[in-house]
Amino acid sequence: MLRSAFYFFFVLIFVVPFGLNSQITFPWSGTYGGAGANRTYTTTVSGITMSATINNSENVWQDGSPVWFPTGSAVSGGGCAGIAATNQGMLLSTDWSTNTTKTITTTITFSSAIKGPVNFKLYDINDDGFGSWADKIVVTGTNAASSAVNIFNVGTACVSTGGSVTGSGTSTLTYNSGISSACTCWGNNEVNVGSSTDCIKTITILYKSNVSPTNYNNPKQYVVISNLVASNATTVTAPTGITGTTAICSGGSTTLTATGGNASTQWYSGSCGGTSAGTGASISVSPGSTTTYYAANSNGCATSTCVSATVTVSSPPNAGTDGSTSVCETSVSPVDLYSLITGEDAGGTWSQLTGSGGTFNAGT
């Protein structure tokens, strides 16, 4: 029975702009969960949890499960000497028992979106020499709104003879190895997931292999994904307060300004993160009743804590219902004007509108 070994190394090196963001590293050195073909991994760094699901279409793991692959480790090869792991990470090793098309899918999810682009390098070393194979790597990603982001091949792609790279700048980037019957070492392909305007939530790396002829049995597959170095987009400086008139009459309006705010400041009513009330350093509001407004700064991927201000809405004073009386022209008796109206608010003043007698209006 013929055997071969396939070595596929994915080394993800994340390079992102930092600004308000700080660099953090997600290691693969913890405990792996799951069972059978479906395995899991979770680690939390600086308040962000990275969760990974690893699915092997054929439930065969040479090491029993995905394992930690520390710096200095190596996978020995035949025609290719194997690769020493310059970046420690997760080793996925399989031994497929049949030659139908197989897949290994690794999906990485961040509890808080990280600032794009997410950058990594893909290393692929095929060790064969007996039969032939055709394999591909497909990379996709989504943003914080669960929409697909564009994936980019960076620089000159490296694939084996007959291979190709398609979809750069679209939502699906595919590396096709071509078909070969000899040992081929190819890779060092660099990928950007998203752009600087994206907030990356998930990354999916799909390996797919189809080996022929059918008697070319038990192909082995090795995948190494390095520790992830990413941008912590959760550190956002909050506004220090809110200024503006906070007491208005019903039907009126006021402008509120967040001290330390900017064009991306998010405003809410009801609660921090509640009903959206606008965007920007200042907003104009016309609440129908007393309302508390909250302002938080955002860098596009994360939002700061909130500051708040309550706008108190007062109803206009009620002068009451009109009244009238008749007096003799020669009368010198005082007239209690308040006794002539009903439903008025307490207080108020009177002003004469016409003549030396006549009509008076109650006002405040």
Image (spheres, helix red, strand yellow):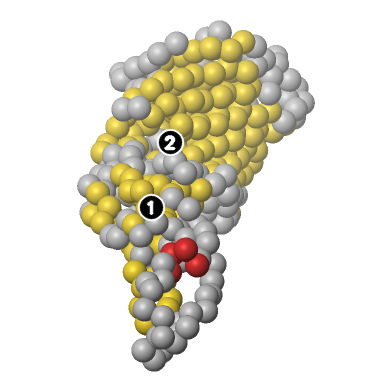
Q: Position of residue 136 (x, y in %)?
A: 60, 40
For numbered disc 1, what is the local secondary structure? strand
Above or below, comparing residue 294 to residue 361 in the picture: above
Which numbered marker is on residue 312? 1
Residue 215 visible to the viewer? yes
Residue for point 59% across, 34% down: 207
Q: Nearer the viewer, residue 61 or 336?
A: 336
Residue 218 x %, y %? 66, 17
Q: Nearer the viewer, residue 330 or 142?
A: 330
SS under mark 2: strand
- Which residue is found at the position 56% from the left and 56% from the top? 170
Q: State which quadrant residue 58 falls in.
A: top right
Classify 104 as above or below 31: below
**Image point (55%, 31%), residue name:** 107
Q: Is residue 28 above or below residue 172?
A: above
Residue 161 visible in image: no
Mark 2, residues whose alpha carbon is within 10 Å: few (<14), some, or many (≥20)? some
Determine the image quadrant of residue 346: bottom left
Q: Residue furthest top?
A: 64
| Residue 36 position within the rendered picture, expressed as x and y whole percent measured from the top left | 65, 11
Q: Earlier in the sequence, mark 1 or mark 2?
A: 2
Residue where numbered disc 2 is placed = 112
Of the residues shown, which amino acid type is indicated by label 2?
Ser
Question: Alpha-carbon distance for marks 1 and 2?
Answer: 36 Å
The N terminus sits in image quarter: top right
